[in-house]
Image (cartoon, rainbow, N blue to C red):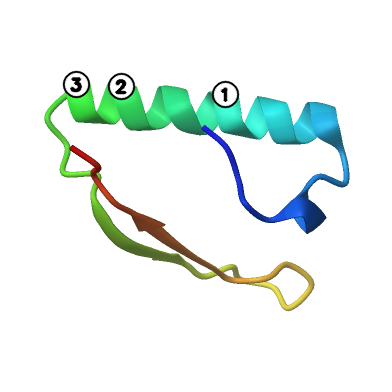
Amino acid sequence: MTTDDAATHRNGAATSEFETRLTDLLLTSFADGADVAGHWRIETPTGSVPDWSIEIICEE
């Protein structure tokens, strides 16, 4: 997995760990039968943390 946003690489170790965990989550969820493709929105309960919009596309 890679990101195309160079600004996100503020902490290389944290970015690498995030990519590893996200890959594990996607592969495990897919193997368990979850429909992981789609648009996901994560809304946080506080203004000090941003909301997130995530799009997962299956590339066959």
Q: Secondary structure at mark 3?
A: helix
- Give the number of the disc on residue 20: 1
Marks 2 and 1, the one that precedes in the sequence: 1
Whether 8 is drawn above or below 35: the answer is below
Quadrant of the snapshot with the C terminus: top left
At label 2, which amino acid type do we have?
A: Thr
At x 35%, y 32%, the residue is 26
Q: Is residue 17 left or right of residue 31?
A: right
Q: Residue 52: horizontal and vertical position, in percent?
A: 55, 66
At x 83%, y 32%, the residue is 12
> Residue farthest to the right?
10
Q: Is residue 54 left or right of residue 50?
A: left
Marks 1 and 3, the one that precedes in the sequence: 1
Tag 2 and tag 3, C-beta contact below 8 Å: yes
Q: Is residue 15 left or right of residue 53?
A: right
| Total numbered badges shown on the rendered structure | 3
For label 3, the residue is 31
Query: How far apart in space, not on screen, are marks 2 and 3 (Cα)?
Result: 5 Å
Q: Residue 35: horizontal and vertical position, in percent?
A: 16, 44
Q: Secondary structure at mark 1?
A: helix
> Residue farthest to the left?
33
At label 3, which amino acid type do we have?
A: Ala
Q: Secondary structure at mark 2?
A: helix
- Give the number of the disc on residue 4: none
45 and 36: which one is in front? 36
Q: Is residue 39 left or right of residue 8?
A: left
- Give the number of the disc on residue 28: 2
Mark 2, Cα crowd under 10 Å, few <14 / some 14-19 / many 20+, is few
